[in-house]
Amino acid sequence: MIQIQSFVFSPFDENTYVLYDETNEAVIIDPGCLMQSEKETLSQFIDQKGLKVTMLLQTHAHLDHVFGSAYVKRKYGVKMYMHKNELPILAAVESRCKLWGIRGYEPVEADAFLEEGDVIKFGRSTLEVLFVPGHAPGHLAFVNHDQRFIIGGDVLFKGSVGRTDFPLCDHAALMRSIKTKFMTLEDDYQVFAGHMDSTTIGRERRMNPFLN
């Protein structure tokens, strides 16, 4: 059974996730740890649980989701997986950090690419890859159907949806992704978003003003 541990990192209040199961194999999703203290918080949890990190997954490559990616790659000797459409986003992170006056970002490169329908395996667990562009051109989400949850990044939030005022965003594509990928899941699926609290598909179907 997959356990989900979340951390809120950086001034952007980004949600970083560690998923692990009874084998103690784990994946890290969107490490937003910018400060050294945040990196230590992440590594201390992994050490205390005795986890073996097997891969780094990115829902997308906006700066707040990759602050700690180079650290995770180096610390755990793992590869970074994302969609190929995120390459221009990743390449622009360093310049955007300078624009925002953000210090401490270490540039990182992707090692492998994921596509819709790929299956991530760790321990005895699996995650299905969904392609959900809009907030970012290569945005991915990771679904587990047995436990009925989705690690959704910045696509669907509690009472809101992802921003589309950044370069290479597309609001129409975002809404298509939500309606054709997220809203086809049943109401009890839990959504772990890139910011704010988790929610459920059913709650957002009933109450999200962007969907009604």
Image (cartoon, helix red, strand yellow):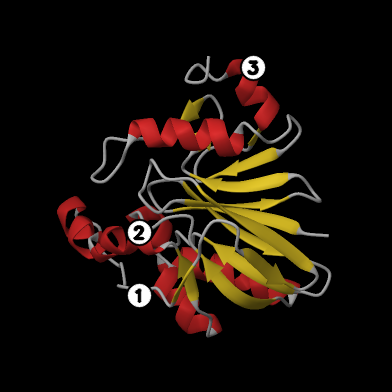
- Front position among marks 2 and 3: 2
The amino acid pointed to by label 1 is Glu
Callout 1–callout 2 Cβ contact below 8 Å = no
- Front position among marks 1 and 2: 2
Secondary structure found at label 3: helix
Q: Residue 109 carries which label?
A: 1
The amino acid pointed to by label 2 is Asn
- What residue does disc 3 label? 206
Which numbered disc flags the more N-terminal residue, 2 or 3? 2
Could you say which is closer to the camera, residue 211 or residue 78? 211
Q: Residue 103 appears in which quarter of the rendering?
A: bottom left
Could you say which is closer to the camera, residue 212 or residue 207? 212
Q: Which mark is residue 85?
A: 2
Q: Where is residue 5 in the image (x, y as percent from the top left)?
A: 67, 56
The residue carrying pointer 2 sits among few (fewer than 14), some (14 to 19) or many (20 or more) residues within 10 Å by Cα, namely some
Q: Position of residue 43 (x, y in %)?
A: 58, 73
